[in-house]
Amino acid sequence: MKTTNLFTPISIGELHLSNRVVMAPLTRMRATVPGNTPNEMMAQYYAQRATRGGLIIAEASQVSEDGQGAPCTPGIYSTAQIAGWKLVTEAVHAKGGKIFLQLWHMGRLSHPSYQPDGGLPIAPSAVPANVEVTTADFKRVPCPTPRALNTEEIPGLVDRYAHAARCAKEAGFDGVEIHSANGYLLEQFLQSRTNLRTDVYGGSIENRCRLVLEITQAITAIWGSDRVGIRLSPYGIANDSGEDEPLPLYSHLISELDKFNLAYLHLIEPRASGTGQRDVDHKNVPSAAQLFRPMWHGHLIAAGNFNKESAEIMLANGTADAIAFGRFFISNPDLPERLRLDAPLTPYNRATFYSRGPEGYVDYPTLADAATDFI
């Protein structure tokens, strides 16, 4: 029997992929402001990283104006944003690639400078995160105490996610990923440290999972279940998140999500949990993919500090079906080809991850570029 590796073809829903090297969603803060619209430089960036039959999960994009919490991040709720994202999807499709969009709301990790009314960001409960946030004018300040959503406001939040899903469809994406990880709004509802509610969205594990499941239901009704994925970070500690006993919570949630027959479950390995400001490699932590694989019957994408060897071990033993790479996709536009050839990887420059211009964004060379320069 042939061993599954990074270059064994796979079908995820109706998408037929030539490899299992997935580009992870990566915040890069290059959208045009005002308006938070994708632009030509973003289209160039994604096109550089597109491969025939390869899958890109595009960066987290706020589902509504009140969901923003970092400067120059794209949205997916306005006509101008749809037009901007069309530049990206058309460029990726021209290379034969596939692309999903990650739907995002930052919840308590936002700031009044992003809110339409200048008020407090929303959250399940008025529990501030013990972190700093970046304001709209690029200042680092303590995270504010958020405003707890009223029960009657939650259907409107579900509607905002559904509207964003429809906008993503109009923009030409092949599917969407629900961002329910890394301490953002949906994970804030999941975890007992941040959800102190006493209504039907708080208290028990079943109640804390309710919003994620309602949003999943609304989005699959728009896209079909085989075009929707979800990202979770069990045992993660990013952005002052974390559940004291994650296994009961995520066992219930993943078992319920399994009933939707989604395109994939995307799990961040705990060893890589962090805010993106620095490299982390936590030791003596469990493997999310190993823990939750038995309760997930669909495709599973694993992410977090993988190299070629560790990725292929996970694929060979069936713990994951595809591997998402992040930082090395930034500095290696042709990462699948480099992995296939066992070619050296270009190191990334963290200082340019969240800068504004083309440096560290669209100027990393491919192997072909390097060969031409040498000649």
Image: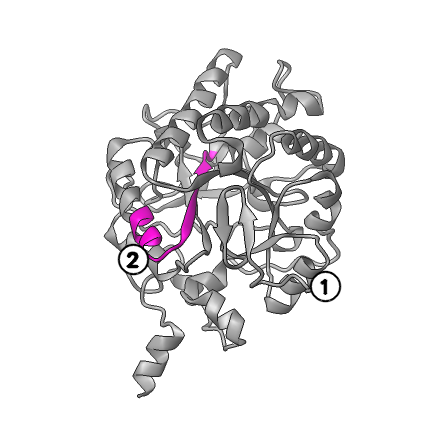
In the image, what residue type sits under mark 1? Answer: Met
Drawn side of residue 12 relative to residue 300, left or right: left
Which residue, given by chain and number where applicable, does mark 2 sit on?
44
Nearer-the-camera pick, 312 or 70: 312
Drawn side of residue 41 relative to residue 173, left or right: left
Viewer can see residue 228: no
Give x and y (percent) for residue 94.
31, 54
Label 2 element class: helix
Give x and y (percent) for residue 361.
34, 61
Which residue, given by chain and number where applicable, does mark 1 sit on?
1
Task: Give the residues in magenta.
Answer: 88-106
For marks 2 and 1 on the same chain, the one whose residue lies earlier in the sequence: 1
Q: Which mark is residue 257?
A: none
Q: Is residue 103 magenta?
A: yes
> In the rendered image of this protein, does residue 130 appear above or below residue 308?
above
Give x and y (percent) for residue 98.
42, 50
Drawn side of residue 260 relative to residue 173, left or right: right
Viewer can see residue 159: yes
Numbered disc total: 2
